[in-house]
Image: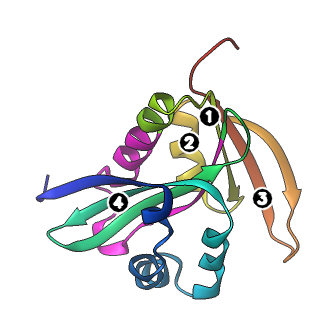
Amino acid sequence: MDDISYRIIVDDAARDKAPLAALCGRVFGTFDPGYLDRLTDVADPVLVQALHGDALIGFKLGYRRGATLFYSWLGGVDPDWRRRGIAEQLAIMQHDRLMALGYATVETRTRANNNAMIILNLRSGFEVRGFEIDAAGNPVVTQRKRLAGPA
């Protein structure tokens, strides 16, 4: 599929903000690179990248939030590369790696107006677990998926 390759980066190597900052600007329109400073303090980050040649065109990034809970924090696909199944493949690879690492559950929060992400998550087995208004006044949906172990 368009010569797209994927790779998984774990632990300290997943903390490198430089490759993500420019792509986040394209994915989110406006993006404060300082938002990535959180990577300094998170536990056990896991980054899944989609690449076309050496160019980063998509990613999914998260970190440990509990003994068996992983928080899928940030991700997206370059607008020029959307609608090719890249986001779905990133999620599949992330969840497979999380199961191999012993996680039982993955959780994510998505702005309520991000219908594409909410629908992708629902089709991938997530359930809606909550709704809130964040500090900036944005409605946010929390979704959770069981990866392994008893329900």
Q: CA distance from mark 3 to mark 2?
A: 14 Å
In this rendering, the answer to whether 22 lies above or below 131 is below
Marks 1/2 in contact by CB < 8 Å: the verdict is yes
Q: In the image, 147: left or right of 20? A: right
Badge 4 or badge 3: first in the primary sequence: 4
Q: Residue at x 34, y 45 (%)?
A: 89
Q: Amino acid at mark 2?
A: Asn
Marks 3/2 in contact by CB < 8 Å: the verdict is no
The residue pinned by badge 3 equals 140
Badge 1 or badge 2: first in the primary sequence: 2
Q: Amino acid at mark 1?
A: Phe
Q: Is residue 98 magenta?
A: no
Q: CA distance from mark 4 to mark 3?
A: 25 Å
The residue pinned by badge 2 equals 121
Q: Which mark is residue 126?
A: 1
Badge 3 or badge 2: first in the primary sequence: 2
The residue pinned by badge 4 equals 49
Mark 4 secondary-structure assignment:
strand
Q: Which residues are magenta?
A: 70-94
Q: Amino acid at mark 4?
A: Gln
Q: Residues within 10 Å of mark 4 (few under 14, many from 20)?
A: many
Mark 2 secondary-structure assignment:
helix
Mark 4, mark 3: which one is toward the viewer? 4
Q: Amino acid at mark 3?
A: Val
Q: Residues within 10 Å of mark 1 (few under 14, many from 20)?
A: many
Q: CA distance from mark 1 to mark 2?
A: 5 Å
In this rendering, the answer to whether 43 lies above or below 78 is above
| Place of residue 114 in the rendered image (x, y in percent of width and height, measured from the top left) | 61, 61
Q: In the image, 53: left or right of 16? A: left
Q: CA distance from mark 2 to mark 4?
A: 18 Å
Q: Residues within 10 Å of mark 2 (few under 14, many from 20)?
A: many
Q: Residues within 10 Å of mark 3 (few under 14, many from 20)?
A: some
